[in-house]
Amino acid sequence: MQTILFLCTGNYYRSRYAELLFNELAQRAGLGWRAASRGLFVKEGVNPGPIAKPTLTALADAGIVPPAADIERYPAQVSEAELAGAAIVVALKEAEHRPLLAASYPGWKDRVIYWHIHDLDKASPAEALGEIDRLVREVVAELATDSEPMTNGR
């Protein structure tokens, strides 16, 4: 089983949606892939629960009911081992996440795929999660049809 790792700042909203959506779609497609998600600057006690309500709403609207363990898990900070263990690493917003990678994991700042998904301060959940939905579906489709999927340039 290969892993795609989705990164955002707090591992509470964007990356969690990408992870849970990817896992559902990959399972439906019978892919040998699994997603994980982590944060680059996780702060404990900041969020009012383990996962953002807009994330849960968007998943429910898509007919996705993730396993309880996945939605009860609190945000987690990424580790070097998790970066190294993933076949594909996607950071959800380059302007936000490239500097965080450069500061904490400088060897990785040019080895991940960057998307451009705004956080709640700049985009509504419908906009941000809608774009994540579109991009995740593209990744799943590519993995389902391509024997040499995109990688992190490794």
Image: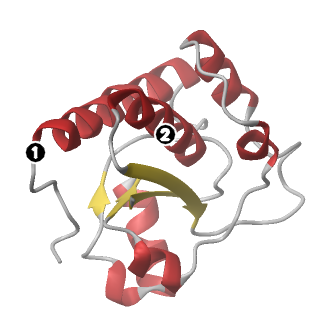
When asked about the image quadrant of residue 5, the answer is bottom left
Label 2 crowd (10 A; few <14 / some 14-19 / many >=20): many
Label 2 element class:
helix
Up-down relation of residue 98 to residue 149 (above or below): below
In the rendered image, the quadrant that contains the C terminus is bottom left
User: Considering depth in this image, is 47 or 136 the residue closer to the camera?
Assistant: 136
Please report the residue visible at 71 percent of the width from the left and 44 percent of the height from the top.
70
Q: Is residue 92 visible?
A: no
What quarter of the picture does the N terminus occupy?
A: bottom left
Q: Amino acid at mark 1?
A: Asp
Residue 49 is situated, as x and y percent measured from the top left of the image, at: 87, 43
Residue named by callout 2: 23
Instruction: Identify residue for label 1.
Output: 146
Give neighbour class at mark 1: few <14, some 14-19, many 20+ (Cα, 10 Å): few
Q: Is residue 20 visible?
A: yes
Quadrant of residue 136 within the rendered picture: top left
Q: Residues under labels 1 and 2: Cα distance?
A: 18 Å
Left or right of 21? Residue 153 is left
Looking at the image, residue 57 sits to the left or right of residue 123; the answer is: right
